[in-house]
Image (spheres, rainbow, N blue to C red):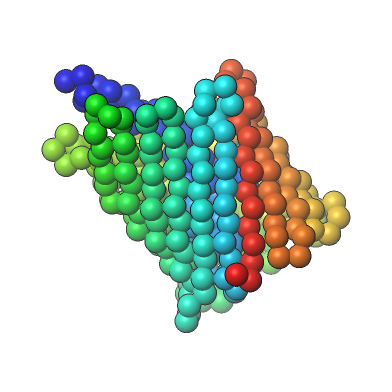
């Protein structure tokens, strides 16, 4: 009985934070907008964006959840073009004391047409509950597509765990299931505006509004807001030849600041 209660508590703790734990400083700088994504971090966002990767690329990301709570996550992602598409591999871990949440993902993205991309990921999740509570695990899928409506408008749709996989068959402990619809509008040559709407099954609705601005070549500044709960985000990214460094700060009005740093290297 106590084990079930403790497990349920940890699952509920994971639900509101899963999207960030599978994200990067790029998306967190945009208030969690990740259903329109490109590059190596598409493994964590919308796997369809892997189709834009033309050269091998790898990245690592690290975050500390609101600093004082000693909750941190670290992840490693790789994208490799193969034949008509791109394979992606991602390993990430969220840890708090003896609680560990690990995801191992294998993804693939490709161009279906000149204007449409599609992708899918198969993920194995393993949650360790400490020495006295053991571990539980599950396999789930994520899938999405990206559609170029025009030279200025891009739509993205993504489904996280659409099959509603559970962590344990006998106890039927539900993983979150989420559908996201996003739009990117190129307001000008240097400004992009983003909007995203998430529907989390049986739980809540989440809105994201963000923008990025390129003041000079190789530098991008990001910012945005998301609801449920309300978080504010700011971020910055800089490219130096083959290396891209991104930093983000998610600001919660009660819990404080949640920083994240991501670094990717192309041409591996």
In the image: residue 215, left or right of residue 50: right
Q: Residue 104 in the image: x percent, y percent?
A: 38, 53
Image coordinates for residue 140, horizontal then vertical, percent:
31, 51
- Quarter of the view holding residue 12: top left
Whether residue 260 is visible, yes or no, is yes
Residue furthest out toward the front? 131
Viewer-side residue, 190 vs 47: 47
Q: In which quarter of the image is the N terminus?
A: top left
Tell me what residue is drawn at x 57 percent, y 22 percent: 68
Which residue occupies the foreground of this view, 204 or 262?
A: 262
Q: Kindly give the residue lying farthest to the right in the view shown.
A: 216
Which residue is found at the position 46% from the left and 56% from the top? 90
181 up-or-down from 81: above or below: above
Number of numbered callouts drawn:
0
- Left or right: where does residue 175 sit relative to residue 30? left
Outermost left residue = 170
Q: Residue at x 66, y 40 (%)?
A: 248
Q: Give the percent coordinates (x, y) of residue 253.
A: 62, 20
- Residue 189 against residue 28 in the figure, above or below: below
* Quadrant of the rendered image containing residue 89: bottom left
Q: In which quarter of the image is the C terminus?
A: bottom right
Residue at image position (21%, 19%) is 2
Horizontally, residue 16 falls left or right of residue 148, namely left
Q: Is residue 186 above or below residue 130?
A: below
Q: Can residue 196 be seen in this view?
A: no
133 sits left or right of 177 in the view: left
Residue closer to the observer: 109 or 57 = 57
Residue 127 position in % (x across, y down): 32, 38
Q: Is residue 265 above or below residue 19?
A: below
């Amino acid at each position: 009985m106590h084990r079930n209660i403790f497990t349920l508590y940890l699952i509920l703790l994971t639900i509101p934070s899963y999207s960030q734990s599978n994200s990067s400083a790029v998306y967190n700088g945009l208030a969690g907008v990740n259903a329109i994504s490109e590059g190596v971090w598409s493994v964590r966002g919308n796997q369809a964006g892997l189709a834009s990767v033309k050269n091998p690329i790898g990245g690592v990301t690290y975050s500390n959840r609101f600093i004082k709570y000693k909750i941190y996550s670290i992840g490693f992602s790789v994208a490799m073009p193969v034949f008509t598409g791109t394979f992606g591999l991602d390993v990430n871990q969220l840890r708090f004391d003896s609680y560990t949440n690990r995801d191992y993902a294998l993804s693939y993205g490709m161009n279906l047409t000149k204007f449409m991309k599609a992708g899918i990921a198969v993920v194995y999740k393993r949650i360790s509950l400490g020495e006295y509570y053991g571990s539980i695990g599950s396999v789930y899928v994520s899938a999405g597509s990206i559609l170029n409506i025009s030279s200025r408008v891009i739509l993205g749709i993504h489904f996280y765990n659409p099959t509603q996989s559970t962590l344990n068959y006998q106890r039927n402990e539900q993983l979150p299931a989420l559908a996201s619809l996003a739009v990117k509008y190129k307001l000008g040559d240097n400004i992009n505006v983003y909007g995203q709407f998430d529907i989390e099954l049986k739980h809540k609705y989440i809105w994201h509004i963000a923008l990025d601005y390129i003041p000079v070549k190789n530098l991008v500044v990001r910012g945005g807001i998301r609801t449920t709960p309300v978080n504010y985000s700011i971020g910055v990214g800089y490219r130096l030849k083959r290396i891209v460094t991104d930093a983000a700060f998610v600001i919660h009005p009660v819990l404080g600041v949640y920083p994240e740093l991501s670094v990717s290297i192309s041409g591996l």
